[in-house]
Structures are given as structure tokens and as C-alpha cells.
Image (spheres, rainbow, N blue to C red):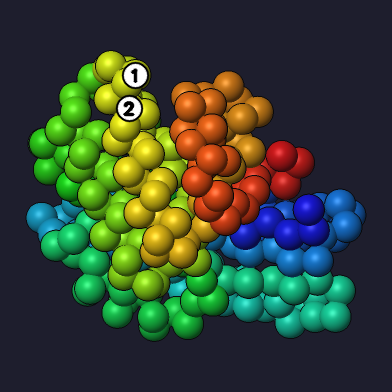
Amino acid sequence: MSFNLHTHTTRCNHASGTDEEYVLQAIQNGYDTIGFSDHAPHIFPQGHKSGFRIPCDMAQDYADSIRALKEKYRGIIDIKLGFELEYYPDLFNKEIEYLKTFEYDYLILGQHFTDNEYEDYAKYSGNKTNSVAVLDKYISQAILGAKSGYFSYIAHPDLINFVGDNDVYIKKMTHFVGRLKEIGIPLEFNFLGFTKGRNYPNDDFWKIVSETGNDVIIGLDAHSPDV
């Protein structure tokens, strides 16, 4: 593996290290490419402020920093500017136009919430749930995001923490994985979840992926330079 496209910065409030420290570590590890994909700044209604993504007033600094490093290390390592973003149907088109102003290189779909993240009914995908309705909503939103054509791949596609009937999970995820293969979008095996013993990567999910034959990418989901 000679590249990583899933890298966060301190601007998201849950990562450490400077942008350049990530680059230097990637060079030391023999990487050809490092992509920064911090949680995208988002203009929310109702004055909602997210605690896990780049604040809008820091977004230009993020873009400028990554571009400066790209020039500084040109010829040594390829550095790309990206964002990790959810698909929130009611907000998506406006959000994409906003992000285009930063001239990003790529977007990663990371569906951390169903519906959105600011309404009372919104659900964090990593919380345990036995609700088939929540599972269905996660799948439908991720499929719509994949179909939009804006995303290069799906981060931790098995983030949804369904603890209900496993036969239901396998049936639903077989449909999900099949649709994503039809769309032609790669799926990420998330290294952070693997090393931290989280509910993802999910063994049943990845067995389905193996049998279906989807394209797969490994994402470090780096939150520190020494991940």
C-alpha cells in the first residue's frame, strides 16, 4: 500500500499533529500519495455548529495549508486536498457548491448520521440500534450519495451499528453491497476501526463484499501522524 486518502487534521477537534507532520510521516513510510480528507465544513440551518468538523471560518486555512504543502513537497510525494462528507439530501446541492469554492481534489462519503445531524430525530450511525428503519435509512442515503457521482469512495461503509436480527442485517447489506457494485464506487476497509476494535469492519459485511466482488480501498482514517 503506497497511499492513503483518509487523513484528518486538528481542525476537526478530534485529531492531533500538524499537517506537515502527516506529510513527513507518509514520506518516511514510503507513501507515494497522501490525501487530506478532514470532515467538511458545512453551512447548517438553524445556526447549528458541529463539534466534529472543520469550522467554516477555518476552511480556507485548511485548503491553503494543504496546497502549500503540495508545492513544498512536489516531486517527493503527491498531496491531495479532499473532504469527508455526509449525504444529507436537503442540504447536499448547496453544500457541494460551497465546497467547490475550495477547489478540492476529491470527496469521501462518510455517512455518520442518518437524515442529518442537527434534528432531534437524527441518528448517529455508530450508535447501537435494532431499528430496521434506521438501517434502511442509512442504506438509502448512502446509495443516493454514491449515485450522485461526487464521491470517490465510501469510508467505513459498515459503520451502521445494527444489533438486531443478523439475518435481516445480511439480507439488507447484500442488497446494499450489490447496489454499490452496480454504481461502481469502491468501499473502504477502515484501518482505524480495525485497530481500535470498533463495530466496523464487520465480518459479515466484508464476507458479502468478498462474494460480490466490489472494488476495495484501505483507508487509514488517520487522526495522528503516527497512526
Total marks placed = 2
Label 1 to label 2: alpha-carbon separation: 5 Å
Q: Is residue 218 left or right of residue 181?
A: right
Q: Is residue 54 left or right of residue 121?
A: right
In the rendered image, residue 135, in percent from the top left (x then y), is placed at 25, 34
- Image quadrant occupied by the C terminus: top right
Which residue was labeled with disc 2?
Answer: 169
- Residue holding disc 1: 166
Query: Which SS class for mark 2?
Result: helix
Q: What type is the residue that disc 1 sits on?
A: Asn
**Residue 96 placed where, x, y %?**
31, 74
Three-letter amino acid code of the residue under disc 2: Tyr
Which disc, if any, is residue 188? none
Residue found farthest to the front = 211
Front residue of 104/14: it is 104
At label 1, counting other C-alpha atoms closer than 10 Å, the crowd grade (few under 14, some 14-19, many 20 or more) is: few
Visible residue check, residue 20: no
Q: Residue at x 74, y 82 (%)?
A: 71
**Residue drawn at 80 percent across, 75 percent down:** 73
User: Are the residues at dot 1 and dot 2 in contact (C-beta closer than 8 Å)?
Assistant: yes
226 and 187: which is toward the camera: 187
194 vs 92: above or below: above
Q: Position of residue 184 (x, y in %)?
A: 46, 64
**Secondary element at tag 1:** helix
Q: Tell me the crowding category of disc 2: few under 14, some 14 to 19, or many 20 or more residues within 10 angstroms, Cα based.
A: some
Measuring from the top left, give residue 163's x and y in whole percent.
32, 18
Find residue 90 and report its image quarter: bottom left
Residue 219 seen in this snapshot: yes
